Structure formats: structure tokens, C-alpha cells
Image (cartoon, rainbow, N blue to C red):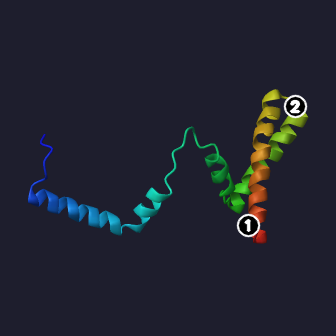
Amino acid sequence: MSIGRLPEHEQHILDEIERTLRRDRRLDRRLRTLTMRRGPDITRPLRRAAGYRPRRWTVAALLTVAVALMVTGIMTSAPWAIWAFAGVWPVALFAAFRLLCRWSGG
């Protein structure tokens, strides 16, 4: 490959590409705010959880399943029911909390 100047038509094409890229404001902003990360983004799951917007039927279903598992666990003392309740209950509470926050306008 030669290290000299590009042919005239290729230089013209390259100049046109550069002009187009300079006009792209979104690309310019992304390049200016580009930061190098050294590890995984641990805040991403937290941001996704904070943006969770459950529907009322989803919350009702989660709470119904949690109560059914709680009653089953109390009546039978089955470890699977207790562990299933322990897994569903925090999710149901979080969804109910997010729904109440949305309804209250906060």
C-alpha cells in the first residue's frame, strides 16, 4: 500500500464522509462523553430494576402466588413451598411498591 496522497476521487469521497460525520450531533455527543470502562457495569441491573413499571394484574398475580405459597408452606411445612415463597415474596413486594409509587405520582 502506498503512503502517498489518495487519488482525487477517493479524497473527495473521504471528505464527504467526514462532513457527514461532523454534522451528526448524536455521534459527536457520544464521542465526547465516551469513557473507558475497566470492568462490568454493575449499576445496569439496578437502573433496569428502578425503571420497572409493573401492571396491576402482574402485581395481583404475584401477590396471589405468594399468599398461596405461604399458606401451603404453613399447612404442609414442605421445604419447597417455603423456599418458593421466599423467592416470590420479595419480587411481589418490590412490584407492589413500584406500582404504588407510580400511582402516587412519585
Residue 11 location in percent, x, y?
15, 59
Residue 89 visible, this orientation: yes
- Identify the image quadrant of the C terminus: bottom right
Say which residue label 2 marks. Answer: 76
Q: Nearer the viewer, residue 25 or 55?
A: 25
Determine whether the residue tagged by mark 1 lies in a helix, strand or loop.
helix
Packing grade of label 2 (10 A; few <14, some 14-19, many >=20) is few
Say which residue label 1 marks. Answer: 102
Q: Is residue 12 placed above or below 67 in the rendered structure?
A: below
Left or right of 88 in this view: 29: left
Q: Nearer the viewer, residue 95 or 36?
A: 36
The amino acid on which the numbered mark 1 sits, given as a three-letter code, is: Arg
Residue 30 location in percent, x, y?
46, 58
Q: In the picture, residue 21 is in which quadrant?
A: bottom left
Which residue is rendered at x = 80% and y = 39% of the image? 85
Cα–Cα span, label 2 and label 1 = 37 Å
Which residue is rendered at x = 79% and y = 58% of the image? 97
Q: In the picture, residue 2 is in which quadrant?
A: top left
Determine whether the residue tagged by mark 2 lies in a helix, strand or loop.
helix
- The label shown at residue 44 is none
Question: Who comes first in sequence, dot 2 or dot 1?
Answer: 2
Q: Nearer the viewer, residue 41 or 45?
A: 41
- Identify the image quadrant of the N terminus: top left
